[in-house]
Image (cartoon, grey):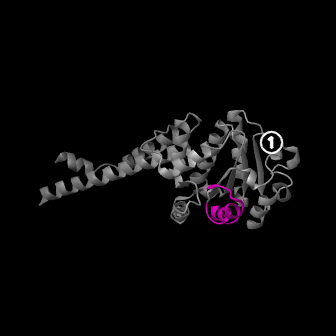
Amino acid sequence: MKFFDALQRIDRRIIYIVMGLLVIFPLVKPLGLGVSSGPRARTLFDAVDSIPAGRTLLISVDFDPSSMPELYPMLAALMRHAFARDVKVLLCGLWVTGAGLADKAVTEIPPEYGKKYGDDVVYLGWKAGIDAVILGMGENIKNVFPTDYYGHPLDSLRMMNEVVRLRDIPMAVAISAGTPGYTDWLNFAQSRYGLRLGAGVTAVSAADAYPYLQTGQLTGLLAGMKGGAEYEVLVQKKDYSRAYMPAVAAMDSQSLAHVVIMLLVIVGNIAYFATRKRGA
């Protein structure tokens, strides 16, 4: 009984310290606890994996810093997957608040694979108009984006000599935190120009995307942090990357924290009922 009394008198600061350590440790060293590839992530991975070397993957960066923890790992994993397979990457965005995030990815990830800007990756940037921008890219990308995000004329970028319009791109992935996002690409790029489309969304938006998966309009879906972690695991299993996996680390941190909370609830209730019985 003394044991149960001791449990009820544990200083809450000790619990906070233990929780803090368990949350921080996986962020430093990801453990990969229970992260397996689901069918939606696998479908998207296989689709990107089937893009022939030398062709182009379009990624639309339609999110902002507030949704960065969930969606940026998807962007990074997709770019690493493409570069590992010698697939070129073309980025653009329908959210002006995502411009800096795409720039961060373009600056940091291509050097890992020895890829050169203009030859293997191009970032078009953001332009107002949403649907008009997508429809314009379907006819001629250079008419919509005469220059890229950094001010280079598109004619001066060798990669853009092979990518004139959306029909020259075998697949696109829209990483969306809301509207505008993947639904605009579905309505105006897929339906009109036949662009094959995958999507990455926040966890709260995933339910809205499932009908498009069932109809076959979306080729794969990454849903929230878990979806990003699944894609990171798939990329590393194929030995396409050995980079730090932020989504896997975050999932590990959440998992450990949830397990500890459940254990504390169970142990606390056992101690409470044991001491109450003795008192009675």
Give residue 89's position: percent from left, percent from top.
71, 45
**Is the residue marked by circle 1 packed among few (<14), some (14-19), or many (20+) residues within 10 Å?**
some
| Residue 79, percent from left and from top | 65, 43
* Left or right of residue 192: residue 30: left
- Residue at 52% x, 59% y is 203
| Residue occupying image coordinates x 25% and y 56% | 269
Closer-to-camera residue (252/152): 152
Name the residue tied to disc 1: 118
Report the label total.
Answer: 1
Q: Would residue 260 appear left or right of 205 to someone viewing this image?
A: left
Residue 272 sits in quarter:
bottom left
Helix, strand or loop for disc 1: loop
Q: Residue at x 36, y 48 (%)?
A: 260
Q: Which residue shows up at 45% across the image and 45% down it?
A: 36
As for residue 111 lying within the magenta part, the answer is no
What amino acid is found at the position of numbered circle 1 in the picture?
A: Gly
Would you identify the image quadrant in which residue 280 lies?
bottom left
Is residue 152 visible in this depiction of the protein?
no
Residue 99 in the image: x percent, y percent?
Answer: 73, 54
Q: Which portion, as a residue range, is magenta?
A: 177-197
